[in-house]
Every structure is written in C-alpha cells, then in structure tokens.
Image: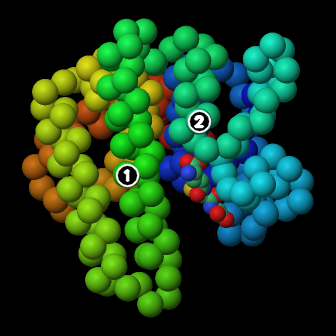
Amino acid sequence: MIDLYTAGTGNGRRASVMLEECGVPYTVHKLDLTKGEQKTPEYLKINPLGAIPAIVDHDGPGGQKITLSQSGAIALYLCEKTGKFLPKDMAKRAVAMQWLLHAMSDEAPTSGALFRLGSLPEKPAAAIASFETRLIDMFRHVDKRLGEAEYLAGELSVADFALYPVVAGRMALLDNAGKLDNLKRWAGALAARPGVSKGMKVPA
Ligand SMILES: N[C@@H](CCC(=O)N[C@@H](CS)C(=O)NCC(=O)O)C(=O)O
C-alpha cells in the first residue's frame, strides 16, 4: 500500500494519475496548502521541502519502505515498480524521457510560475503575458510532435501522463491560442481514460 500526500494541483494529480494508471492501491492524505499543512513538522519528515506530492511506499524495493517526493520521480518510480508506461526499447525509452523532462522541466514550471504570478495582489501583466507566450510556444511544439505521432513517445508512456495535468489546467489558454488540434485530440484521448479521469479527481 502506498500513502499519497497531495492537494488539488497539477503536480499532485500527476502522482494520482500515475497511481491509477499503474493500478497501484493507495491511500490519499489531502493537505490544505492554504493552511500551510505542507509545512508541519510531521509532513516535513516526509518531504523536507514542504511541497506536495509525496508518497510513502511501505512495500518498496527489497520490501523496504521508501519515501519519495517530486512528481516526475514518483511517476518514474511507479513505472519501474509495475513495468508499465516506459518503453522497453532503449531508443523509444530515450524519446519518452525527453518528453517527460520537457513536461517536468519546461512546461510544469512555466505553468507553476503563471499560477504564482496570478496569485500576486498586483497581478503583473507583462510577466503574466511573457509566461503565457512561453507556455503557448511549448504547446505548439507539442502539437507539432502530436501531428507526427499518436503519443509523445510514439506509444503511450509516462511522458503523456506527466504532461496531461499541465495541459488540462490550461485549457482556456489553449483555446485562446487557437488551432493546436493535435494537442486537443491527444488531451481528449487521455481525458477519456478511466485512470486519468479518476486520478484527476484526487483529492476528492
Ligand atoms: N517539482 C515539484 C513541485 C512541487 C510543488 O511545487 N508543489 C506545490 C503544489 S503544486 C506545493 O506544494 N506548494 C506549496 C509550497 O511550496 O508551500 C513536483 O513536481 O513535485
């Protein structure tokens, strides 16, 4: 059994989508970020950075308990634990990693920056516009790829599940940007998966 510490954000949902898609049983512990529940001494023992998501797998490698943070690392761990969503072929796996890291190091932080800027009382318009342009450019990059392949790595992989919460959280921006039909087709296909749909509703 895995304990998942999470909140209703894209990073949190990346972990719950992966748990659902990999078919791993888990218990949800909902943290209220607005109340600072991610900074309590008890939670800092689980993730010293004081951020969600984090998991505790009581049946980790060698039967030992393992505690993990970083939604990308959690996603990869679940792939390795279950043998799912990581291509076996090395070349295909490298492409999956490329898109996974694009999701994690380019798209998710840009979307996160937009969230933070939008939460500031002064809502700095120039900075928000700059990050929106950057995110739309990235969406166009992904749209082009999805015009050549059904999924980011060719086959369905961890990269798709890692990117999906970012795209799902930015549908209004996607609509404003226009076109992006390949990205919308891909987002629709992922949204229709029961595991994605269930994972995106966590925490209830
Ligand atoms: N790169 C990390 C980002 C984690 C993160 O920033 N989590 C946010 C919510 S999406 C958080 O817990 N923020 C609360 C805080 O930092 O106090 C991941 O992918 O897990």
Quarter of the rendering containing residue 73: top right
- On the question of residue 20 being in view, the answer is no
* Left or right of 96 on screen, residue 15: right
Determine which quarter of the picture holds residue 2: top right
First of labels 2, 1 by sequence position: 2
Question: How far from the left and from the top, in percent, is residue 53?
Answer: 65, 46
Task: State the scheme by which the image is colored.
Answer: rainbow
Task: Determine which residue is flagged by label 1.
Answer: 106
Label 1: state its secondary structure. Answer: helix
Q: Pinpoint residue 171: horizontal percent, then vertical percent.
A: 30, 53
- Residue at 86 percent across and 50 percent down: it is 45
The residue at the point 12 percent across, 55 percent down is: 178
Q: Ligand 1 lies in which image quarter? A: bottom right
- Name the image quarter holding the C terminus: top right
**Mark 2 lies on residue:** 73
Residue 169 picture location, percent across and down: 40, 53
Q: Residue at x 44, y 37 (%)?
A: 162
Q: Nearer the viewer, residue 120 or 144?
A: 144
Determine which quarter of the picture holds residue 157: top left
Whether residue 47 can be seen here: yes
Residue furthest bottom as drawn? 122
Q: Secondary structure at mark 2?
A: helix
- Dot 1, how many residues are within 10 Å of its Cα: few (below 14), some (14-19), or many (20+)? some
Which quadrant of the figure contains the N terminus? top right
- Ligand 1 is within 8 Å of the C-beta of the residue at disc 2: yes
> Count the marks: how many?
2
Q: Nearer the viewer, residue 23 or 50?
A: 50
Tag 2: amino acid: Ala
- Mark 1 residue type: Asp
In the shown orientation, is residue 148 left or right of residue 76? left
Find residue 76 and report its horizontal and vertical position in percent.
55, 28
